[in-house]
Image (spheres, rainbow, N blue to C red):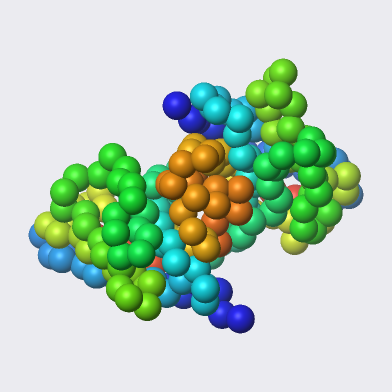
């Protein structure tokens, strides 16, 4: 079975631009979460989606948005990019958001560099 | 509120030596606890988890961790380090037992170096 897949793996953007990151969860998983991992730190929670609805949001500005599609894939959008948005963006999936005991299954991430 | 503290951002051991990576947590509810490993330029891989029951949990690659409620700790150990264990390790707590969120709170990570 395929794991969590993210695209693209790397990208470089200029300050002020917009970026869209994509994630396909493990087959059968209906919940997708997004995390930001800045170099030298642990991942920080951005969003969780379940059944196309936002179920949770971390302490990130409104420039960050996301959505989930009927096939449970998800997009993370970041507007007006800042240098500080440079990070590894991780997508995680689980069967349902309430199954906290599962932990989560992570993709390999998208490395975003803002110049 | 939930939080995780990993003591020691860098740990170095010789091949064959004991690996001990420290993790202390704070949680307002009985926690679910996890250890993840991250190899360079990759995502996170689940090593092991504690949910309920036995406090000594075994994971992949010979790692194990013990949940000690009285010490609010969940330290990761491996009896004999291998070169392939070199990676960054993250301890995490699930902050929302019984809720519909299940977000993870991560520590800052511990970089493990294994010397030949």
> Is B1 on the left or on the right of A77, as rendered?
right
User: Where is residue A72 shown, x and y percent of the image?
Assistant: 38, 72
Question: Which quadrant of the figure has residue A32?
Answer: bottom left
User: Where is residue A22 shown, x and y percent of the image?
Assistant: 33, 72
Question: Which quadrant of the figure has residue B62?
Answer: bottom right
Q: Is residue B103 visible?
A: no
Q: Nearer the viewer, residue B76 or A86?
A: B76
Q: Nearer the viewer, residue A95 or A8?
A: A95
| Residue B96 position (above or below residue A80) | above
| Residue A5 position (above or below residue B25) | below
- Residue at 44% x, 66% y: name it: A30
Quarter holding the N terminus of chain B? top left
> Is B116 on the left or on the right of A26, as rendered?
right
- Residue at 39% x, 67% y: name it: A110
| Residue A15 position (above or below residue B80) | below
Question: Which quadrant of the figure has residue B67?
Answer: top right
Quarter holding the C terminus of chain B? bottom right
- Residue at 64% x, 32% y: name it: B23
Residue at the extreme bottom: A1
Q: Is residue B96 visible?
A: yes
């Amino acid at each position: 079975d395929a794991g969590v897949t993210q695209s693209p793996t790397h990208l470089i953007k200029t300050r002020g631009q917009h970026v869209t990151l994509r994630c396909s969860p493990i087959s059968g998983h209906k919940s997708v979460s997004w995390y930001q991992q800045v170099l030298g730190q642990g991942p920080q929670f951005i969003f969780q989606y379940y059944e196309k609805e936002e179920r949770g949001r971390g302490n990130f500005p409104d420039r960050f948005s996301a959505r989930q599609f009927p096939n449970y894939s998800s997009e993370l959008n970041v507007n007006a990019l800042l240098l500080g948005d440079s990070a590894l963006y991780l997508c995680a999936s689980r069967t349902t958001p309430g199954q906290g005991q599962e932990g989560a299954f992570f993709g390999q991430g998208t490395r975003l560099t803002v110049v | 509120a939930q939080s995780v503290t990993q003591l020691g951002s860098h740990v170095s051991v010789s091949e064959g030596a004991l690996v001990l990576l420290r993790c202390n947590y704070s949680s307002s509810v009985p926690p679910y606890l996890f250890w993840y490993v991250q190899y360079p330029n990759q995502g996170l891989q689940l090593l092991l988890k504690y949910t309920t029951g036995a406090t000594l949990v075994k994971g992949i690659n010979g790692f194990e961790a013990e949940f000690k409620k009285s010490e609010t700790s969940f330290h990761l150990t491996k009896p004999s380090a291998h070169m392939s264990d070199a990676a960054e390790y993250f301890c995490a707590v699930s902050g929302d037992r019984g809720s519909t969120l299940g977000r993870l709170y991560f520590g800052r990570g511990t970089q493990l170096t294994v010397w030949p």
